[in-house]
Amino acid sequence: MRYENPIIRGFNPDPSICRVGEDFYLATSSFEFFPGIPVYHSRDLVNWRQIGNCIERPEQLPMEIAGAGLGIWAPTIRWHEGLFYVTAKMKDFGNFIVWSADPATGWSDPVRVDIEGIDPSILFDGGKAYYTTNLRSPEGLESISMVEVDAKTGDKRSDVRAIWHGMADDRPQKLEAPHIYHIGDWYYLWAAEGGTAFEHMITAARSREIWGPYTSCDAPLLTNRYSEGTGVACSGHGDLVEDGRGNWWTVHLATRPDDRWYSHLGRETFLLPVTWEKEWPVIGDGVSHLVCDGPLTAAQQPLNPWQADFSSRQPQWLSVRRPVAAHYDFRGDRLALTPATEKLSDPLGSPAFLALRQMDIDCTVEARICFDPAFDQSEAGLSIYIADYGYYAFCKKRIDGRNSLMIYRQGGDFAPVSLPLADGEIKLRIQADKKHYTLSYALDGGEYVRAAVVPVLTKADAGKGFTGTLIGVYAQTDRAGEKPAEILSYRVFPA
């Protein structure tokens, strides 16, 4: 059956997947955004719905220390004896494990695992739990290293050992993203090499014993570095799952690039079928594609429109770092968003900002906002946001005692747009395509008027390009005590 990639669109890198009966669960990286580590559910591998987040309470992790592109990296999700376990790395906190009986909610506080390296993974096998990261060997070689742990306490139960040095074995290859699987008589070790940009790939090794020695596969299982005509780049960092009917699949990250490898949407989640030859996994033709065929059980459905429900905070909403609860008042029919003195541009701030991952390359976002600020320099509206140093603001702002419609950019060369604006409700619309955003506004139930067409945010705006574009509502001020902006509706439409 034919389907299209990515299966989860927008900023969703480093996917990890597990199956429980007929249900599939998938987790991805979230970096400096809260809630952290989104969890998705599917019954058919191609139609996914976000059901929760593993880091769902501000006190679970010190998100206030998470700078742009830092925070929570590369989760692994596994199920064992009635519990879901997720492990990940938070910069300046360490590797950790959380668990829950219900992947939608109720995740434990993190327990730390005292091992360095990033991209941790866990394997439950023979009554034991094995924990792997990309920790270097004592000799300084890039390595995948492993330790036995207690999954509930994080305590180590063995020495840490380097078990594989990657396909190259003799030079740095940015070896990361390990996952170990016990399939038949073999332990298979998957990893990523080549960095997370154009040279990215999935590599593999296998052993009869979990501690090795591991023998490398002759070639990468997957890479798009030699296939620029596919419309896909950066393929790598994958996880393996069997669908319960004898078919095998990998989910992996990749981009739909704006240039040679970078996409303003960030790294997304792709799906490819896996077969076996001579007891080695084979991922399709070794290249990721936008259109694929595989033994699916259901047809892929088009993306649905999304509308905010202001009775509570939905799991899709993201804030930057640790949110200040007093900024967000969900009133059922509207959100009262109190302007914060911490701005979108503050490198470690917690602005009053509530956003979604951009749904797709082509989509439309609309919001109705009522905001009549009392103080000069107070503003509220929509932001197209990648990082504190790279975003657009499309807002109502008070300047010299008068309201204006403002469009400005943090980072990059852009002449701000300023138009006079009356008091009262305003509707803002952002129409996205591959290269531009068209920004329009409407007053008093009137027709939309185009205010500006702006280019998408670039690689220069995104730092290392670990994250992707968010679009959401925000409110900020220079003086505490500003009245709330009332967000009356927020809707997203696919193309």
Image (tube, grey):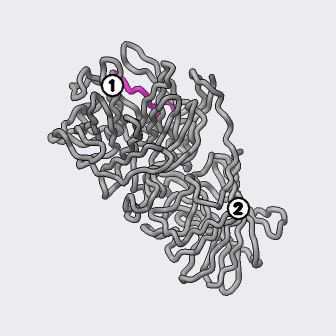
Q: Main secondary structure of the magenta part?
A: loop
Mark 2 vs mark 1: which is more N-terminal? 1
Q: Return the residue found at the far top.
A: 278
Work out whether 399 lies above or below 270.
Answer: below
Q: Position of residue 165 (x, y in %)?
A: 25, 33
User: Left or right: where does residue 441 sit relative to residue 14?
Assistant: right
Location of residue 85 (image quadrant): top left
Residue found 36% across the figure and 29% down from its top: 203
Nearest the viewer among 14 and 338 is: 338
Mark 2: few/some/many CA within 10 Å (<14, 14-19, 20+): some
Residue found 70% across the figure and 49% down from its top: 493
Mark 1: few/some/many CA within 10 Å (<14, 14-19, 20+): some
Nearest the viewer among 126 and 67 is: 126
Please give the residue where the numbered disc 1 appears in the rendered image: 182
Q: Is residue 220 magenta?
A: yes
Q: Return the residue found at the far right.
A: 446
Which segment did they paint magenta?
218-227
Q: Amino acid at mark 2?
A: Ser
The quarter in which the C terminus is drawn is top right
Q: Position of residue 127 (x, y in %)?
A: 27, 31
Work out whether 125 lies above or below 354.
Answer: above
Work out whether 236 lies above or below 395.
Answer: above
Q: Position of residue 149 (x, y in %)?
A: 24, 41
Location of residue 332 (image quadrant): bottom right
Please give the residue where the numbered disc 2 appears in the rendered image: 489
Label 1 SS: strand
Q: Is residue 311 magenta?
A: no
Label 2 to label 1, Cα distance in Å? 49 Å
Residue found 54% across the figure and 36% down from its top: 232
